[in-house]
Image (cartoon, helix red, strand yellow):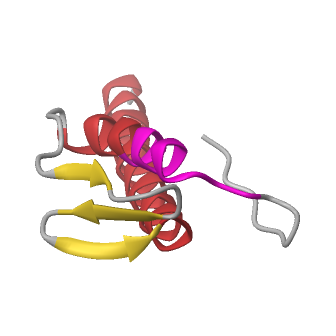
Amino acid sequence: MRIEWGSTMQITSEQALHSYANAYVKLYNRHPRDMRALDPEWVLVNGAQMHAHELMYLTAQLVLEYKQGQARKRNLVNRLIGWLKQ
C-alpha cells in the first residue's frame, strides 16, 4: 500500500476507511470495529472523530508496523536457515 501526501490529493472518508481497514486486517488478522464515515471528510474510528487525512496517517503507521513485523520474520527465518546450513 502506498500513501502519497500532497496538496492536490483529496481523500474521501470512504477511501480512508477502506485503506485503514485493509491495513488493520493485514496487521491484526481481524476486522476493525466501530468505523463509519460521518461526512465526506470526517470519520469515526473506535469512538474517535478525525479528519480523513488523520486516518490516512494512522493507516501509514499500521502499514509501517506490518512491514517491520514481516522484516523481523524474514530475518528470523534467514538466521535459522544459516544456522541449519552449518
Q: Is 30 placed left or right of 74 in the picture?
A: left
Q: Percent x, y for residue 23?
A: 39, 43
| 61 shown above or below 21 | below
Q: Quadrant for residue 7, please give it.
A: bottom right
| 28 shown above or below 82 | below
- Closer-to-camera residue (73/67): 67
Residue visible at 14% across and 34% down in the picture? 30
Confirm whether the magenta stretch covers residue 18.
yes
Residue visible at 56% across and 69% down in the picture? 53
Q: Quadrant for residue 43, please give it.
A: bottom left
Q: Specify the farthest residue to the right.
A: 8
Q: Is 11 placed left or right of 76 in the picture?
A: right
Total marks shown come to 0
Q: Quadrant for residue 39, please give it.
A: bottom left
| 19 shown above or below 48 | above
Confirm whether the magenta stretch covers residue 7.
no
Quarter of the image that includes the C terminus: top left
Q: Percent x, y for residue 40?
A: 52, 55
Q: Is 64 placed left or right of 31 in the picture?
A: right
- Closer-to-camera residue (51/25): 51
Give the magenta-colored segment's residue range: 10-20
Quarter of the image that includes the N terminus: top right
- Closer-to-camera residue (79/55): 55
Residue visible at 88% across and 64% down in the picture? 8
